[in-house]
Amino acid sequence: MKRLVKVEREIEEKLKKQAKRYNKSYPSETVRFDTKRLPLLQNQKATDHLDYLFVAIDDFSRERYAAILPDRTAAGAAKFLLRDVIDCCPYTIECAYCDNGAEYRDNAGHPFGIACVPNNISQKFTRVARPQTNGKAGRVVRTLMEMWHDKHPFKDSAHRQKELCRFVNFYNNVKPHKSLKGDTPFEVLQASFPTCCVNNPTISYTL
């Protein structure tokens, strides 16, 4: 009897988790953003300046964007949005989903919000003290750190930036994704925008 109750509870918990999962209907519906302070490079001292990793992921296609910036400021977040996301993606972003960090949210004159307005991008934010509601972006950060940063002894900042670009291209264009039924983000975007010119370079990357 106790075993049956335990099984029923496990099934109930599993159903609850499945109910919380969701999939967006099309690319650009929601793009999630996150930021992480990067560790010092091997040849750096504890007093040296730290760089920051900015990431974004499209909820539908899982296409990822990333850049390394010298600070975690609102101006830096706006630069990342305009230069590394909007200028690179083949669709018009409808919603930017962010945590409540100062680089993404503050007053009415916030640079990130100002950058969103002329591009018709709405903003949504995680609930206060609930960063797990932006879990997809957090997972992007962890994946990048595990598969890119932790596997390379970078010579300098320029080398780290170059390897980041190579890895993101590999991840978007070459690596199959289980969540996409074996497709790549590039293939999902091609299916959604068949007439759109999306670059798909042949990339070799050693994991």
Image: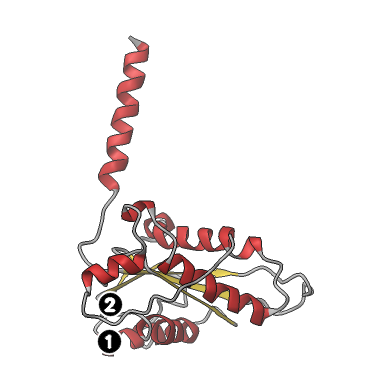
**What amino acid does circle 2 point to?**
Ile
Task: Give the labeled residue for mark 1.
Answer: 119
Quarter of the image with the C terminus is: bottom right
In the figure, residue 108 lies in which quadrant? bottom left
The CA distance from mark 1 to mark 2 is: 8 Å
**What amino acid does circle 1 point to?**
Asn
Looking at the image, which residue is at 31% across and 66% down?
A: 187
Kindly give the residue lying farthest to the top in the view shown: 1
In the figure, residue 137 lies in which quadrant? bottom left
Please tell me which residue lies in front, 194 or 126: 194
Q: Please count the marks in the image.
A: 2
Marked residue nearer the N-terminal end (1 or 2): 2
Looking at the image, which residue is at 70% across and 72% down?
A: 154
Mark 2 crowd level (few <14, some 14–19, many ≥20, 10 Å Cα): many
Horizontal arrangement in the rendering, residue 156 relative to residue 61 (left or right): right
Compared with residue 6, is residue 197 higher up or lower down, i.e. above or below? below
Compared with residue 198, is residue 26 higher up or lower down, i.e. above or below? above
Numbered tag placed on residue 93 in the rendering: 2
In the figure, residue 125 lies in which quadrant? bottom left
Please tell me which residue lies in front, 125 or 6: 6
Residue 106 position in % (x across, y down): 41, 79
Compared with residue 113, is residue 145 higher up or lower down, i.e. above or below? above
Q: Are marks 1 and 2 in contact (CB under 8 Å)?
A: yes
Residue 119: tell me if it is visible.
yes
Residue 27: tell me if it is visible.
no
Residue 193 position in % (x across, y down): 22, 74
